[in-house]
Image (tube, grey):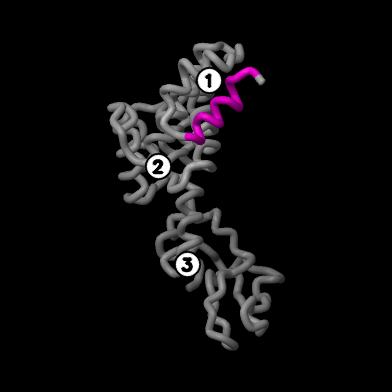
Amino acid sequence: MKCPGQDTQYWGYGAIFEADCPDCGATVEFFKDDTMRTCKGCGKRLVNPKLDFGCASYCQFADACLGSLPPELLAEKRNLIKDRVAVEVKKRCGKDFAKIGRAARLAGHAEQIATREAGADLAVLLCGAYLTALSRQEAGEVFAAIAAPEGLVTEVTSLLEGLSSGEEGDVNRAILQDACHIADEEDRCGGEPLGEAAFMEGLALRLKTAGAAHEARRVLVRP
């Protein structure tokens, strides 16, 4: 598969190069626009080691290009989208720095909690965290602007709907709800640390995940 976004008329030195197969050690020749090549020695399909697939988060040819890629790189494309969502949210918030700051804090807390919770989906979580700063209509505009995959849109929309309803849900919903509780407590405390007793009698009772309890202690509780 060739990258359809490349134009060979601008190629120069290094457009054709060689790489060693990690399985059998045979030499595999790559053209600059190859996404993958098959090793003639062992038959393994190799990803172009010099192609930066970060372009997949915005390239109009991404679907054609990525259709030939292995699952781990498709997952990487999904994760890249969260960065574009963050940029689009900041554009729409303009100079409302309080709204931008809260969304960023939510995303930060959600990411930290997710490292301690099995089954969490960072792409869904962080997109959802950033989009709490916008209305439902604006969130739809963001998805359209970045051409987000339909499956991801569905998951994030479901996450946000569950967040507003307060209903129990999957691990992603529990994490984002906990991140919101932590951000709310930060706003209430105004930078002042919580004592252990106040934490255990208040915020700790509202948190659903062990990861959130750890994160809350890290950012709120007096050492």
Mark 1, other Cα within 10 Å: few <14 / some 14–19 / many ≥20: few
- Of 20 and 214, the residue lying toward us: 214
> How many angstroms separate mark 2 from mark 3 (CA)?
26 Å
Q: 103 or 93: which is nearer to us? A: 103
- Disc 3 and disc 1 in contact, CB within 8 angstroms: no
Q: Residue at x 34, y 27 (%)?
A: 135
Instruction: Determine whether the residue tagged by mark 1 lies in a helix, strand or loop.
Output: helix
Q: Is residue 79 above or below residue 181?
A: below
Q: Nearer the viewer, mark 3 or mark 1?
A: 3
Q: Amino acid at mark 3?
A: Pro
- The numbered mark at residue 97 is 1
Give the CA distance from mark 3 to mark 1: 40 Å
Residue 50 in the magenta stretch? The answer is no
Marks 2/1: CA–CA distance: 22 Å
The tag earlier along the polypeptide, 2 or 3, is: 3
Tell me the kind of residue under disc 2: Ala
Q: Specify start and end residues of the magenta stretch as a single range.
A: 210-222
Counting residues from the start of the chain, the first of labels 2 and 1 encountered is 1
Question: Is disc 3 placed on a helix, strand or loop?
Answer: loop
Q: How many marks?
A: 3
Q: Residue at x 48, y 42 (%)?
A: 117
Q: In the rendered view, does 25 fall on the left or right side of 206?
A: right
Q: What residue did someone put label 3 on?
A: 70
Q: Is residue 4 left or right of residue 137?
A: right
Q: Earlier in the sequence, mark 3 or mark 1?
A: 3
Residue 192, quarter of the rendered image: top right
Q: Which mark is residue 145?
A: 2
Residue at left offset 36%, top offset 47%? 152
State yes or no: discs 2 and 3 in contact (Cβ < 8 Å): no
**Residue at position x 49%, y 49% in the image:** 79
The type of residue carrying mark 1 is Phe
Q: Report the mark closest to the observer, 2 or 3.
A: 3
